[in-house]
Image (cartoon, helix red, strand yellow):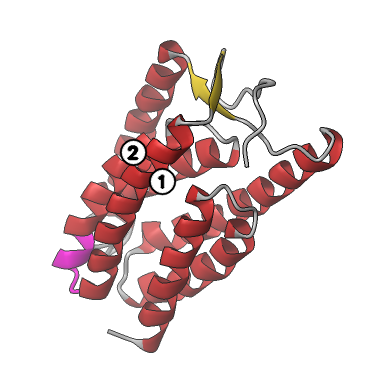
């Protein structure tokens, strides 16, 4: 356990709590948290997770901009929570499975990555969940529940016990987030990433 892992853990809990509250400050907190964890995962040779943190940084910057843009263009109302249609959800899952298989095989052949297939699963489906969160889709929390379940096992095996404990907290917070966002959910989306007008949320 390192000081960076401790800092990343604390920032992670704070960032998810802010996101459950639909508080826009969750995005800048998240930007710092993923930068810290990129360093932690590099030291553990979880290279897919290092790449994941870089992708998280980009998507979180986009999420911050997207939420702010809606606030400035919609009479200062918050971006509404919306759902995906079943076909869109199935498309995300299918695409994620294909990319996971390809990336896992690549990492297994070309690097000394630990647990390359499971690490690839965390990479790909975390990106999907993060993107859906940036678009304020309710189903992002379902994605986080699945990802966090896998991550707990991977990080425990790699002796990142504090991080595994963090993901137990994340799992519980994802369940909380799903329940909280469901209370304010708006219309169903027609395709992955589509945004529709819905009731304003606080």
Q: Quadrant of residue 175?
A: top left
Q: Nearer the viewer, mark 1 or mark 2?
A: 1
Highlighted magenta segment, given as a residue range = 154-159
Q: What residue is shown at x 59% (from left), y 64% (from top)? A: 31
Residue 149 in percent (x, y) is at 22, 48
Q: Position of residue 172 (x, y in %)?
A: 28, 51
Q: Is residue 65 above or below residue 137?
A: below
Whether residue 61 sits left or right of residue 85 in the image: it is right
| Residue 103 in view, yes or no | no
Which residue occupies 57% across, 58% down? 26
SS class of the residue under badge 1? helix
Determine crowd level at label 2: few under 14, some 14-19, many 20+ residues with C-alpha closer than 10 A: many
Foreground: 10 or 146? 10
Q: Nearer the viewer, residue 139 or 102?
A: 139
Left/right of residue 22 with respect to residue 85 in the rendered view: right
What's the residue at 39%, 49% (across, down)?
Answer: 123
Cα–Cα gap, marks 1 and 2: 11 Å
- Is residue 84 found inside the magenta-colored segment of the image? no
Q: Is residue 10 left or right of residue 133?
A: left
Above or below, 153 against 7 in this view is above
> Which residue is identified by label 2?
100
Residue 12 visible in the picture: yes
Q: Nearer the viewer, residue 119 or 153?
A: 153
Quadrant in which the C terminus is drawn: top right
Few, some or many residues within 10 Å of mark 1 (<14, 14–19, 20+)? many
The numbered mark, 1 or 2, whose residue comes first in the sequence reads 2
Can you identify the residue that label 1 sits on? Answer: 126
Magenta segment main secondary structure: helix
């Amino acid at each position: 356990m390192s000081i960076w892992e401790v800092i990343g853990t604390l920032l992670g809990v704070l960032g998810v709590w802010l996101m459950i509250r639909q508080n826009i400050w969750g995005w800048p907190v998240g930007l710092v948290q993923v930068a810290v964890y990129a360093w932690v995962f590099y030291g553990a040779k979880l290279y897919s997770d290092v790449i994941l943190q870089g992708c998280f940084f980009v998507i979180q910057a986009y999420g911050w901009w997207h939420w702010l843009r809606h606030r400035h263009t919609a009479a200062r109302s918050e971006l509404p929570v919306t759902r995906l249609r079943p076909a869109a959800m199935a498309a995300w899952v299918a695409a994620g499975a294909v990319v996971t298989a390809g990336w896992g095989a690549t990492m297994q052949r070309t690097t000394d990555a630990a647990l390359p297939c499971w690490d690839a699963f965390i990479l790909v489906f975390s990106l999907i969940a993060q993107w859906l969160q940036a678009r304020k889709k309710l189903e992002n929390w379902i994605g986080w529940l699945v990802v966090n379940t896998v991550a707990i096992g991977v990080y425990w095996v790699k002796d990142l016990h504090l991080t595994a404990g963090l993901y137990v907290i994340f799992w519980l917070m994802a369940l909380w987030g799903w329940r909280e966002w469901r209370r304010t959910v708006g219309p169903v989306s027609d395709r992955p990433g589509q945004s529709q007008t819905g009731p304003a949320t606080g």
